[in-house]
Image: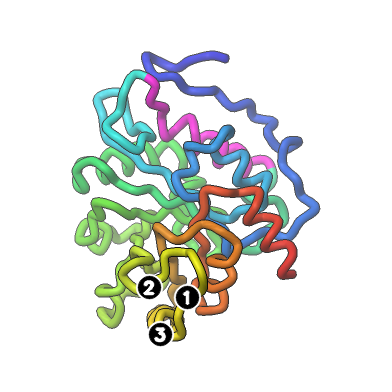
Amino acid sequence: MRYYSSYKVLLFPILICPFISYGQVVHVQAHSHNDYFQARPLLDALDNRFNEVEADIYDTPAGLVVSHERPGADTRLLEQLYFRPIDSLIQTQGSVQKDSKSPFMLMLDFKSSAARTYQSLLRLLKQYPRLACTSASCPVIIFISGNRPLELILQDPSGALKIDGRPEDLGKGHSSMLMPVISDRFQNWCSWNGKGHPSTDDGEKIRSLANKAHQEGKKLRLWSIPDHEEAWAFLIDCGVDLINTDHLAELNRYLQSRK
């Protein structure tokens, strides 16, 4: 294993495709929560046919680093974990997930200052024009959550970066190109703790939110969900588009079983 600078960063080889299973349909509903905690960040998600991954990032003197808490000595760089391998896949096969008809979704959760992190991200993107695509046929969509620089993104004429919406953003005229996803905490819409069965009331609240998002062409994601099969089924049946999970292989098998 080689390391970059003072931060431990696995340098992914260009030929990562043999590790990825291409025999399955791409799961456009699958969102890898805090993907960098997986044994092989990004690669495990691709191998399980996920179409969306999430990474928390901080702006530091060493660059944009991926970390859940404040960065330490073992923090890894966004460029190494995600940008380089994604760019390599697009260059070699034209898409992140082979033969996928949907753009791959990379959600970056800003943990440091919204404006400063945004400017650092724009500088990094200049080195990866394939990741800063602005056409309707982009192979990857990068959208920002956490400390969201909403006004800065709204003012950016390039449209290279998108925003992770909130329920209160619905009805404000933001296009689905700019705001492809609406996200919120599961507990804001449902009292079910994952044990027993959810109530009809809970289902109706989530369906109502999903319908509002869908009317604007946006997808719905809820985080902090009970992360098991019964909850996945409940959310999908309620119209939730993106299933937030830490259990990649299990969700892969479950979504295959629904085909």
Neighbourhood count class around disc 1 (C-alpha, 10 Å): few under 14, some 14–19, many 20 upward: some
Q: Does residue 13 show up? A: yes
- Quarter-of-image position of residue 56: top left
Tags 1 and 2 touching, CB below 8 Å: yes
Say which amino acid is labelled 3.
Asp
Q: Which residues fall within the magenta stretch? A: 74-92
Residue occupied by mark 1: 198
Q: In this view, does 145 lie above or below 126?
A: below
| Residue in the foreground of this view, choosing between 249 and 56 | 249
Disc 1 element: loop
**Residue at (44% x, 17% y) in the render:** 4
Q: Is residue 130 above or below residue 102?
A: above
Residue occupied by mark 3: 201
Q: Give the main secondary structure of the magenta stretch.
A: helix
Name, please, the residue furthest toward the right: 23
**Residue at (38% x, 82% y) in the render:** 205
Tags 1 and 3 touching, CB below 8 Å: no
Neighbourhood count class around disc 2 (C-alpha, 10 Å): few under 14, some 14–19, many 20 upward: some
Residue occupied by mark 2: 190
| Residue in the foreground of this view, choosing between 211 and 204 | 204
- Residue 94 lies, in percent from the top left, at 65, 49
Q: Nearer the viewer, mark 1 or mark 2?
A: 1
Say which amino acid is labelled 2.
Cys
- Specify whether 82 is left or right of 74: right
